Amino acid sequence: MKNEQLSDRRKFLLTMARGVGLSAMGALVWTAYVEEVKAAPLVLRPPGAKKEADFLKSCIKCGLCVEGCPYDTLKLAAPGDNLPMGTPFFTPRSIPCYMCEDIPCVPACPTGALDSKSVQSELDGAMWWDIKKMDMGVAVVDTQSCIAFWGIQCDACYRACPLMDQAIKLEYRQNERTGKHAYLNPVVVPDVCTGCGMCEHACVTEKASITVLPREVAQGRAGSHYVKGWDKKDQERVKSAEGGTTTTERSKEKAIDTLNDMGDLLE
Amino acid sequence: MKYLIMRRILQIGLLALYGAANWYGYKTILQGNLSASLLLQRVPLSDPFAVLQMLAAGAALSSTVLIGAAIIFVFYAVIGGRAFCSWVCPVNMVTDAANWTRRKLGISKVQKRVYMSRNLRYWVLGLSLLLSAVSGVAAFEMISPIAMAHRGIVFGMGFGGAALLVIFLFDLFVHENGWCGHICPLGGFYALISRFSLIRVFHDAEKCTACMKCKEICPEKEVLHMVARSSESVLMGECVNCGRCIEVCDDDALNFSIRKLAKKAKEKS
């Protein structure tokens, strides 16, 4: 009797061990795939999307935003697109975001992966859709292939921009080659640009010379070491910065002592 | 055949409604897909297993999706969880096709059975939640052939068809009921929540002539352990309520019943 009980327990433990072993094997392949496909830094998300990591957590891949979009801008990533499967994205060169004033894709989201509050502003005590708060990415100009920078007159992107003269400005320069013409160079104002991609869609060059990239990819960060001393507002930015000092063997002594200490060199 | 026909009508009808919403903008009845949808433009519905994974991944979810998941959860907990598998899930049509071909070609008779535990799905279920927590995304939703199938039909297939072909070939040549009956964690999830569900197949042993046709056709043979032995309801959560056993039974020994009524009927006899 006692022996039988023991062997039952043994059997159970072995079954469990086999399950754990198989699971570990499966987990290895499974996580490898998930981690790989998660890394899609260039994907452009719908308006109001949370930060990519949070967005991936909370998107249920139902496509209600896709159906809410009246322009067929949004697509769900299908197997083979090499994007996190089933998540919504858009390709502005094909169909840009037309920035509907009521942003119908956002309230369609059942999970909050598209956050209504992030694209609303308060006015007279009520919340209103505010397309200027959309942030899908930021447009970047390739000044080498942009024909406006060659001196050929083109303001396609400037005129296509829904925030004309705010998100893209034209910078006038004298064309020294001809001596009597002007360059009308498009310059993006990153703080204003919403990343809708109408400029990329409108660009006349063979491959778009102005492209929308996720802000995280396109923009740098000066960090707290650099401050615009002439700008009071910028001081605010570094107010809560934590001091970062590097300590090495040498820095334990005073600088003047280290500089005067020639002992090591002479020996 | 009537249950089979009804099932196909429901399965294809749902996909047609979802498809009509996306392709033609007909959103009056149903829109979205099986992961989450909007019924009659008002009632949110969502996949409770997907929501569970998302919570495991650490998502902050809005109440809409939680309400939707609760509605579906309660619905299947009452109807019989795995009714989803045989009445709604599009993969069911793929695996049924594989099973049908398998029977016609007599593969099961020739092939030595590969050992694969039916409990494997619970391991995959546990793993889905664990990996969701580790990687911060709903892990099964990233690879789910079920989602690939319905999303593919509603929103565009991509290479999703390949996944379905693989499942078809796996079920046909490698293991009978391999995907739906052994691996799929969504099936496992619905099996777990249907413990107390009301709609059950009732077996009447007095009418049974032990021809075993029901066991031959059943995709989850274990649940019919009482056949030819005793009169009782099929209580195991793994039963998909597909009604195939009822259809093939020539003796009227199997029928759908409401759980408690079945019990009372049994007490009377």
Image (spheres, coloured by chain):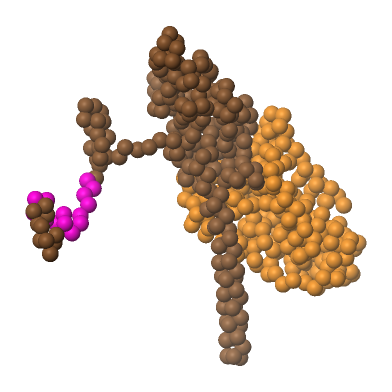
Is A184 in front, or is B253?
A: A184
| A255 drawn magenta | yes
Q: Residue visible at 39% across and 19% down? A: A124
Left or right placement of residue A96 versus residue B238 in this view = left
Is A5 in front, or is B184?
A: B184
**Magenta span of residues:** A243-257
Indicate the quadrant where residue B123 lies. bottom right
Residue B119 in view (yes/no): yes
| B159 drawn magenta | no
Is B169 in front, or is B12?
A: B169
Compared with A26, A38 (above or below) is: above
Q: Residue visible at 14% across and 56% down? A: A252
Q: Position of residue A230 (x, y in %)?
A: 21, 27
Is B173 in front, or is A161?
A: A161
Compared with B162, A173 (above or below) is: above
Q: Residue visible at 59% across and 63% down? A: A26
Left or right placement of residue B170 versus residue B124 in this view = right
- Tell me, what hue is chain B? orange
User: Is the C terminus of chain B in the top left, top right, bottom left or bottom right quadrant?
Assistant: bottom right
Q: Position of residue A14 (x, y in %)?
A: 59, 78
Indicate the quadrant where residue A13 lies. bottom right
Residue B239 in view (yes/no): no
Q: Which chain is brown?
A: A
Q: Position of residue B232 (x, y in %)?
A: 76, 66
Residue located farthest toward the top when viewing the structure as drawn: A180
Q: Residue visible at 21% across and 49% down? A: A245
The dominant secondary structure in magenta is loop
Q: Position of residue A238 (x, y in %)?
A: 25, 37
